[in-house]
Image (tube, rainbow, N blue to C red):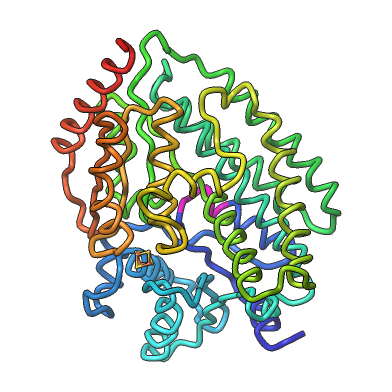
């Protein structure tokens, strides 16, 4: 075992709440290989304030929120730095995401606390995870798929529920059940898939029992934007619930979409480096095949439930839609996906799109310059960027105005 692996197995690993359901499922995936993982505390104004004490103000919102969640752990009565680890994703990309890791390490060093910032990366073959790395990666991918599905069921059902609160309750019990299947130890991939199929079928059937009133279709609002901010309720000031309160239904761009984008970029980079016929390409293709296979097996249980909510078969469909405005060859990352997905949502019948962006994030700023043209080309399709800076601002009147536009767009389309 390498040193990091020894360390991680000796500690409690906290997973940041990018989304609550995603963090729960990811913690369960780590538990399946014997790591004591749990979800970081809930983000709130207090955790954000804790982080701000260490930041200059130039950092982006997801960085502050993630750090705040970690610092909240340090306030727990049983906190022991030498038995604590924090999971932090990292990358070498052009945005501030790559700064999270060195900054978090520096802050805990300054505090004189020997916590482990655990940042497994594909650059070293995930060696920090140790001998179970490949097993974990596959379970983690399944965790992404099931949490995306669970969120999608929640968002499409809750606005129509006849009994207020029931959808949230079924969401919670379903999440618990799915996490049990993800966390099982010492079973094969096929056995875990069977367990997941049982859990996901039970979840689907539980959601189907919820009585809904669909006599009037609410305006469907596609949600795009920066991945952390759109998924983290505190970061986006609970905007999705506000849209529901103002009479809308939301459809969130899922996390798997980003994973497929990075995989597709990896393939393109290999081609660019003249490695079309290489072992790296074989490994990339095999991985994509396995990912696709797992995704389709689980999704096939929900064909009926997701009628009218079709997702693209391949990420390139989204990127092609974005091409006239932001071609992937000239622009990278979330901005390309957000523009393409906004158009996708319109084609699937959405009445508007909201782009959730952290204040000062380049992705939202670039998209905002492109959206007016997209909107015009789609016959006045309402698209609006909402910026967030960690302060719990009241967006109610802005959302009400946006919903009015979406409703009008929906009515006009129905009359055509
Ligand atoms: S995309 Fe924007 S908000 Fe997200 S990590 Fe990068 S700079 Fe920060």
Q: Name the foreground residue: 190 vs 352.
A: 352
Q: Quadrant of residue 188?
A: bottom right
Q: Quadrant of residue 310?
A: top right
Q: In the figure, 366 relative to 253: above or below?
A: below
Residue appearing at x 38%, y 24% in the figure: 159
Q: Is residue 317 magenta?
A: no
Q: Is residue 104 left or right of residue 413?
A: right
Q: Residue furthest left?
A: 397
Between residues 323 and 74, which one lies in front from this camera angle? Answer: 323
Q: Main secondary structure of the magenta part?
A: helix
Q: Please tell me in which quadrant of the rendered image residue 277 appears.
A: bottom right
From the viewer's perspective, tell me whether residue 115 is left or right of residue 221: right
The residue drawn where x is 50% and y is 74% is 91
Is 201 situated left or right of 366 in this image? right
Q: Position of residue 148 (x, y in %)?
A: 55, 43
For the C terminus, which image quadrant? Answer: top left
Which residue is at 78% across, 65% downward? Answer: 282
- Which quadrant, please, contains the N terminus? bottom right
User: How far across and down, in percent of the image, does residue 48 sit?
Assistant: 29, 65
- Residue 90, given in percent of the width and then of the height, sits at 50, 73
The stretch in magenta equals 19-24
Q: Quadrant of ligand 1?
A: bottom left
Asked if 351 appears above or below 321 in the picture, the reply is above
Residue drawn where x is 52% and y is 55% of the image: 258
Q: Position of residue 232 (x, y in %)?
A: 39, 52
């Amino acid at each position: 075992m390498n040193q990091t692996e020894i360390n991680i197995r000796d500690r409690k690993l906290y997973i940041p709440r990018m989304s609550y359901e995603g963090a729960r499922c990811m913690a369960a995936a780590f538990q399946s290989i014997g790591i004591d993982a749990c979800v970081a505390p809930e983000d709130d104004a207090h955790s954000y304030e804790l982080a701000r004490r260490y930041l200059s103000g130039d950092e982006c919102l997801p960085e502050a929120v993630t750090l705040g969640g970690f610092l909240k752990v340090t306030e727990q009565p049983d906190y022991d730095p030498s038995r604590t680890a924090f999971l932090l994703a990292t990358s070498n990309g052009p945005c501030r995401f790559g700064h999270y890791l060195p900054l978090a390490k520096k802050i805990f060093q300054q505090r004189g606390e020997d916590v482990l910032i655990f940042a497994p990366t594909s650059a070293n073959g995930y060696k920090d995870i140790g001998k179970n790395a490949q097993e974990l990666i596959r379970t983690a991918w399944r965790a992404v798929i099931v949490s995306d599905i669970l969120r999608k069921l929640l968002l499409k059902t809750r606005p129509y529920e006849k009994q207020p609160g029931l959808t949230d309750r079924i969401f919670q019990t379903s999440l618990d059940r799915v996490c049990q299947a993800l966390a099982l130890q010492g079973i094969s991939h096929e056995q875990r898939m069977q367990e997941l199929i049982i859990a996901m079928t039970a979840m689907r059937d539980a959601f189907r029992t919820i009585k809904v009133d669909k006599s009037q279709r609410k305006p469907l609002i596609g949600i795009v934007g920066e991945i952390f901010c759109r998924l983290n309720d505190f970061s986006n000031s609970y905007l999705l619930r506000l849209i529901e309160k103002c009479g809308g239904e939301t459809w969130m761009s899922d996390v798997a979409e980003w994973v497929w984008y990075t995989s597709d970029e990896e393939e393109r980079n290999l081609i660019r480096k003249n490695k079309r016929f290489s072992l790296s390409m074989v490994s990339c293709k095999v991985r994509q095949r396995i990912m696709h296979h797992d995704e389709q097996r689980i999704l096939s249980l929900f064909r009926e439930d997701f009628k009218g909510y079709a997702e693209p078969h391949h990420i390139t469909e989204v990127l092609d839609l974005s091409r006239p405005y932001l071609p992937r060859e000239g622009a990278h990352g979330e901005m390309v996906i957000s523009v393409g997905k906004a158009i996708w949502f319109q084609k699937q019948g959405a009445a508007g799109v909201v782009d959730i962006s952290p204040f000062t994030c380049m992705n939202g700023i670039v998209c905002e310059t492109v959206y007016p043209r997209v909107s015009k080309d789609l016959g006045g399709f309402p698209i609006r960027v909402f910026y967030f800076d960690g302060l719990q601002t009241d967006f109610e009147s802005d959302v009400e105005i946006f919903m009015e536009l979406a409703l009008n767009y929906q009515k006009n389309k129905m009359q055509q």
